[in-house]
Image (spheres, rainbow, N blue to C red):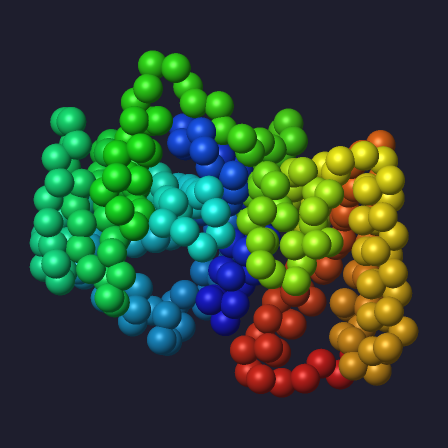
Amino acid sequence: MIRTLALVLLACLACAAERIPADCRWIVQLDVQALFKSQTGEWIAAQLVKQPHAARLKLLESISGLQPRRDLRTVTICGVGADDDSGLVYARGTFDGPRLVTLAQAAEGYAAVPAGSHTIHTWIDKGKPAAGCLVQRDLLILGKTADRLREAITALEASAVPVPVVSLPAGWADAAFAVCAADQLAALAAGKPESAMLRNVRSFAARLSEAGNELVLEARAGTTDDTAAQQLVDAGRGLAAIVQLQRPGKLDAALFEALRTARLERDGSQASLRIALPIADAVRLIELKARGGKSDG
């Protein structure tokens, strides 16, 4: 259940206050504290005290000293490609440095790699390389290779702030608990069927927030020209219409209404989407999915 919601959040949405490497073309950020202060976060917190989640969190705390809800402030994920070794995770919060180092030292293939005044710790995790460094007292950076972590540290400590390719609409990060941005989506989706549809999309940003009792998803796509933006809007409207026509008896009533009232618009070469779903219905659908049940629409 929690994993389902986490995947929805991280796959769809968030921002970057971190000084990330300038070559990053996508970024996702979750404001953990803002999330737990929201209605959605209250539901997540209620699930975390249930089994098996409570036992897993207790184990995590016992070996690392980390209690996510209490200790994490933000989690930022960024990278260059979709399936390469450039991915980085920036976790802001309160960490027990010595315990984290001891945990890394106990892992398979452990090695300590000097990086200026820092030490990068590398190990093998389920047959794949992993690396981490507590760069600041409140900042833990994770990645796949020591070289990539060096680049992250360089960007963080550079006298001139790196200017990343990706950016968010002004004010978006302040009004949401999850936001994301990406550049050159067609390149990120290279080799996948959707890459053709995205070839005219230059940039993308999305955020997840709450408005009253609704969970709201907003997205913006910057395209090559007005025609491409209109084509994107028309394709979205057509897809929504097909779903509503072909699955009226199978589509949950709340989802049907969310699709019916969704706003899909064009402003010049930019296409935008806003879709809202009552929080109670979002929770109900997640729980229904977790039980393997079917919506009665």
Note whether 158 is above or below 142 in the view shown.
above
Relative horizontal placement of residue 114, taking residue 223 as reference (left or right): left
> Hey, which residue is sitting farthest top in the picture?
159
Q: Position of residue 284 (x, y in %)?
A: 64, 72
Which of these two is toward me, 31 or 279? 31
Relative horizontal placement of residue 128, taking residue 259 as reference (left or right): left
Note whether 243 is above or below 121 in the view shown.
below
Is residue 177 visible to the viewer in this orientation of the structure? Answer: no
Note whether 265 is above or below 196 in the view shown.
above
Which of these two is toward me, 36 or 19? 19
Which image quadrant: the C terminus? Answer: bottom right
Q: Position of residue 259 (x, y in %)?
A: 81, 61
Is residue 51 visible to the viewer in this orientation of the structure? Answer: yes
Q: Residue 249, located in which quarter of the rendered image?
A: bottom right
- Name the residue rendered at 82%, 70% in the picture: 243
Q: Position of residue 6 (x, y in %)?
A: 49, 60
- Name the residue rendered at 31%, 33% in the picture: 151
Relative horizontal placement of residue 190, taking residue 257 as reference (left or right): left
Q: Residue 155, located in which quarter of the rendered image?
A: top left
- Name the residue rendered at 73%, 54% in the picture: 197
Which of these two is toward me, 42 or 185? 185
